[in-house]
Amino acid sequence: MYNPAVSQKSTKSPSLRDLPKVDALLSSREFEELIARYGRKPVTEQVRTALDDLRQRLRGNVAAGADELTGAALAAAVSAAMQKLFAPRQCRVINATGVVLHTSLGRAPLAPRAVEQAMREASGYSLLELDRESGKRSDRDLLVSELICRVTGAQAATVVNNNAAATMLILNALADGREVICSRAHMVEIGGSYRMPDVMRKAGCRLVEVGCTNKTHLRDYASAITPDTALLLKVHTSNYAIVGFTEEPALEELVALGRRHEVPVFFDLGSGSLVDLSRYGIAREPSVPELLKSGVDVICISGDKLFGGPQAGMIVGRPDIIERVKKNALFRMLRCDKITLALLEGTLELYLDEDRVFEAVPTLRAIARDPLDVRRAAEDICARLKAAGVDASTAASSSQIGGGSTPGEYLPTTVIAVRRLRKSADDAARALRLATPSVFCRIESDTLLFDPRTLLPGQESELAQAIIAARV
Ligand SMILES: *Cc1c(COP(=O)(O)O)cnc(C)c1O
């Protein structure tokens, strides 16, 4: 057995000969505990790394104290490294930014009911691609396509990995090697290298740009149609607004034009909503069911934006188009896994009752939250902070939907403002980010702002505790 006392007794600087042996260390009691907890392989690797490090330092005459060579010191160092290695990479996050769909914070938080259901389904075998009735193979998207049709009124539907994948797939399935007409007002960049002209090229389509940034007329589309035109494309201007002297044809007009020339109309909607949000102070934007009524041939939307579900791209539209999309070779590469499908299923079920969906889906709940309710939460948190000596007050402010939806639109809210900080505002925000749970807020003129609108149920007191504990 390795005896730590041996290397401790000498007071002169340790030499390479004083380095403990790996085997001896691993059979000591401290290391047996670490091995039981974390496994032999990672602990052994870490011991070797720690000893290599000491060896390098002794060789390079960089001072290493005798106390660093003891079994206890090495065990402590390895234990710290193991804790770091095994700590959850994704810790719990409190989003107090007031940005409902924060792309860096994972966009939509999922509905607890959908998660519970999905976890039950995912931990065992599933009916992913099997029809129980016939015992034969079936399509995995049938698990959700029926529900998508039911809540959107679509005739047919399918689902892929995300909305970017859906757009690429639809373009390739319907217009590979052919022309796609799109207004210059719709040449969007969503971020993360998603730019419409590049997507077109990758999908094998020839982009035909028409109109101007601010104005595109129906006749611009009409005069660009050739026998080689495969699609008329409309893209939702998710993250910018063109205001002032502007014009674009109504979707119905575009559809009528497409019909006359037998060219389908595709709408890349991005953050489309399945329900009407205008009664919650969001500018009137047609919901997916309304858009479908206009006769548009195919629409795709993100699963994790306003819909409030997992990352996915839902495609709805004409049955023959959905069929072509599903037969395309890319479809197999862009398909969803069973957990995503289960989460989508669980979220879609919540949409069956339009009255309850605003309570059940966290994204919609945050948007629909009564400003009075937000103010009460802000006052409650503020009182807790003041009781702990934090210089906090409440102030009227605004929340944002974010995630590429409703640009330039804000929801009235009440924030908690923390002034006269002990640290700089940036350092205070950093301390909060590094806390567990990790807290995100806004900084405005050296003040930290916390917006309760984006807190999940029960996070009020947690937020107050985190702010107090971080000693901002
Ligand atoms: C967000 C968005 C996309 C990309 O969707 P992901 O789900 O992030 O892949 C594509 N088009 C529009 C118009 C969008 O708003």
Image (cartoon, helix red, strand yellow):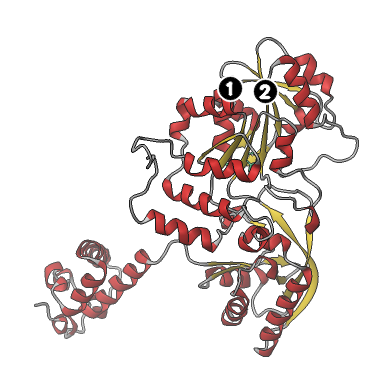
The correct choice, above or below, for 433 with respect to 339 in the image is below
Crowd around label 2: few <14 · some 14–19 · many ≥20 (10 Å) = many
Tag 1 secondary structure: helix
User: How far, Cα to Cα, is label 1 from label 2?
Assistant: 9 Å
Mark 1 surroundings within 10 Å by alpha-carbon count, few (fewer than 14), some (14 through 19), many (20 or more): many
Q: Quadrant of residue 427?
A: bottom right
Q: Amino acid at mark 1?
A: Leu
* Residue 417 point in image, percent of width and height: 74, 75
Compared to 464, does 207 lie above or below? above
Badge 1 is on which residue?
174
Relative to residue 211, is residue 402 depicted above or below?
below
Image location of residue 371, percent across then percent down: 78, 69
- At 49% from the left and 29% from the top, the residue drawn is 326
Instruction: Tell me which corner region of the image, top left, top right, bottom left or bottom right, holds residue 261.
Output: top right
Whether residue 418 is visible, yes or no, is no
Residue type, mark 2 in image: Pro
